[in-house]
Amino acid sequence: MKKIIILAFGVLMFTSCKKSFEKINTNPNAAESATPELLFSGASVNLGSTRAGGDLYASMILSTQTIASGGNFGWGAADVYDISPYSTGNVWRTFYVSTGANLKKAIMFAEQATPVKTGAIGQCKILLAETMYETTVIFGDVPFSEAWNDNIPYPKFDAQEDVLNGILQLLDEGIASLQDENAAATKIGSFDLFYEGNLNRWIALAKSLKFKVLMTMVDKVPAKAADIAALYQEGGMIESASGNFTFPFGTSSGNRNPKYELLNQYAGGSNVFFFANKTVIDPMLTDNDPRIPAYFDISPKGSDYRGVTSELEADTLTSPISMQLYASDAPEYIMTYQELLFLQAEAIVKGYIPGGVALAEQKYQSGIEAACKLYGVIDTVAENYAAAKTLSATPLRDIHMQQWIDLMDRPIEAFTTWRRSGTKGNEIPTLQIPQGAPNAGLMYRWQYPLDNELLPNINAPKEVIYYYQQQWFDL
């Protein structure tokens, strides 16, 4: 059942809750008269929909083990590591064609405009940086320096370290463009589905994304700690939930969240596929976490919240994931304020930023409070719960567990954070190879799509890359 759903759902297209969605150009390579605004909007729609769609979301939440499949009771047979090549291919196409190519073409048109549209250039470069960050943390070494070049039909695969450094450069260029004196007059406004042309929020996002990229690299390149300290001292990152990088969905047909559409099309609008994974719900139950009712529903035949281990059979008492997370207008969070706070707490504990345990605990508690409020916990309840959550003698473990819980429904970020949380075999939380999966090891990457890249690109890696092999940033 799983493979059937992924293949069918992967071809669905979604439009926007705003009129600009209807004007998306579907062939950016032939779009010689398209505007940066249209191309940017099209790229935004494709990225947001793919992140929440069956090809990426459903495959990754199960392999990452933040959400359980329920075995044959729910999503399907135990093939959690057998990700369809159609899914990897569709995700790859989104990153390189419907998102990346749109943005590169938008940048070109903005540079050719009179006057140069520096505002649009900045917004496009920042979104491209996020796109390529997602690409490399999923696949590893990927085309970057030679990608989208009409004169290079077979782009080389750049080393992940070089890609991440290139992303940092893209973000710096984006910030510089948004700080240009003409940026406000040449920005993307109503076609900006994230911030509606608020350039201050785009700059704050770019600095926050820089912080995340640096934290991804620093374990392998300790010298990046100095850059982390300098960026933190400079300030100007996301300062509240109002700065969250969020893709919106709506309630009308064609505008709805793909997670909702998946359940609507194949399960009559109810969630019979995805269940509470014990890696997430058990620590939440221990702490009486107020987010539990927002994350999970009590089974109609149950009286309390219960999880299940990855790929094991759920039963009539197992808690499904809450329909609140699968509502038609549930937004897709790409980066949040609490994500940044937890990263800052981690950086302080590791000594990259001065302040010691007291400051780290302040960031940690603020992150928990923001995370609770984001999912609808009453303010006073969120504040009291967070205030009681002090760091223990193992503060990094505390922080990584809160990151894991917060990122349950955001599998790209959960996957990356888990891999960063410790050396191989010492990640937080400790995961086991799911029942029915190959015994070669846990998943640490997606394999490259064969038909979409390995076969047509003569410069693609010749050696086979397996899902259990670590990426460069992962110790």
Image (cartoon, rainbow, N blue to C red):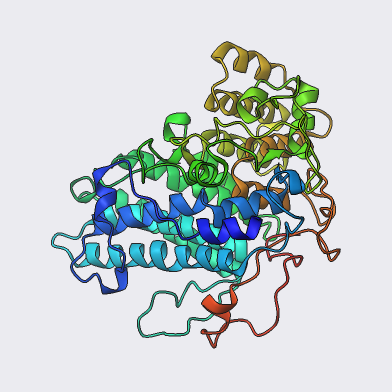
In the displayed structure image, the side of residue 355 where residue 168 appears, left or right: left
Looking at the image, is 146 positioned above or below residue 72?
below
Vertical comparison of 254 with 465: above or below: above
Q: Nearer the viewer, residue 369 or 434?
A: 434
Residue 420 seen by the camera: no
Q: Which quadrant would residue 392 be assigned to in this image?
A: top right
Residue 261 visible in rendering: yes
Q: Residue at x 79, y 31 (%)?
A: 282
| Side of 53 where 369 appears, left or right | right
| Residue 279 coordinates in the image, percent (x, y) | 78, 39
Query: x and y percent of residue 278 in the render?
Result: 79, 37
Q: In the depicted view, which residue is nearer to us: 256 or 332?
A: 256
Residue 240 % position (x, y):
47, 29
Residue 228 versus residue 346 in the image, above or below: below
Residue 314 or residue 217, whichever sits in front: 314
Assign the N terminus to one quadrant of the image: bottom right
Relative to the observer, which residue lies in front, 68 or 378?
68
Q: Which residue is the extreme one toward the front?
A: 268
The residue at 71%/52% (across/down) is 76
| Quarter placement of the C terminus | bottom right
Identify the residue at image location x=42%, y=30%. 242
| Residue at the image position 58 percent from the left and 80 percent from the top | 454
